[in-house]
Amino acid sequence: AVAIGGAVAGGIGALVLANRKTPVVPAGRVALIGDSYAVGLGPELAKLFPDFRYEGHVGNLTSQWANHSAACGTCGDWLTAFKPDVVLLSLGVNDGATPNRANYQTLVSGIHGLGARVIWIEPPAGVNTPAVRAVIASLGVPTVPATTTPLAGDGLHPISYAPWAREVATAVTHA
């Protein structure tokens, strides 16, 4: 009876582990930079990555990050000291209908210059940004596909960032 009970408990434990919500994450340092999506995703991703830092600024454009404009301040200057293996970018939705591809390329080149891989997080599926999506797709970097997490009443931000963060963590582990 004890052996059967142990086998059942072991089987249940295996099922729980197989169905857990927290993905297994790669070793290494992961950073996230971006706009309001980074502000929302950052705290949730910090629960999933053991060596993680982030910076987000509501309403920022790719140009502000690429050119260190006053609206962004020190925009990611900490990345050099942090030495990330992977940098997640969550930028673009604020660029509107005419994103400047050069800003995106500047960001990718700068991150590659740090020796880090770039993974771009696409805006949520419900956000209409075809020009931004086209620029992101043209960069030749891995992307986290657009989340289908339900959006809040503003039509831009998810109701909850936790499901989206799990999607991001899973994509990073498979990139």
Image: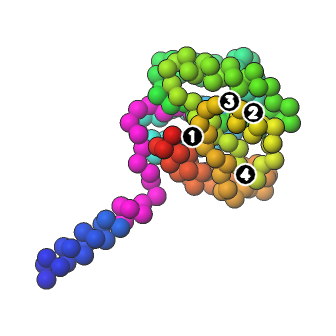
Which residue type does callout 1 highlight? Gly
Residue 54: x percent and y percent?
Answer: 55, 33
Residue 146: x percent and y percent?
Answer: 67, 48
Which residue is label 2 attached to? 135
- Name the residue nearer the viewer: 30 or 101: 101
Q: Which sits earlier in the primary sequence, circle 3 or circle 1?
A: 1
Which residue is label 1 attached to? 42
Residue 127 numbered tag: none
The region drawn magenta spans 16-32
Q: Which sits earlier in the primary sequence, circle 4 or circle 3?
A: 4
Label 1 vs label 4, nearer the camera: 4
Kind of element beneath mark 3 = loop
- Name the residue nearer the viewer: 32 or 97: 97
Which residue type does callout 2 highlight? Val
Query: Does 18 lie within the magenta span?
Result: yes
Residue 118: x percent and y percent?
Answer: 57, 30
- Mark 4 → mark 3, Cα distance in angstroms: 19 Å
Q: Which sits earlier in the primary sequence, circle 2 or circle 4?
A: 4
Residue 139 numbered tag: 3
Residue 24 vs residue 2: left or right? Answer: right
Which residue is label 4 attached to? 125
Query: Does 5 lie within the magenta span?
Result: no
Kind of element beneath mark 1 = helix
Kind of element beneath mark 2 = helix
Query: Looking at the image, can residue 96 be seen?
Result: yes
Residue at coordinates 71% horizontally, 32% vertically from top-left?
138
Quarter of the N terminus within the rendering: bottom left
Label 4 vs label 3, nearer the camera: 3
Disc 4 to disc 3: CB gap under 8 Å: no
Disc 3 to disc 1: CB gap under 8 Å: no
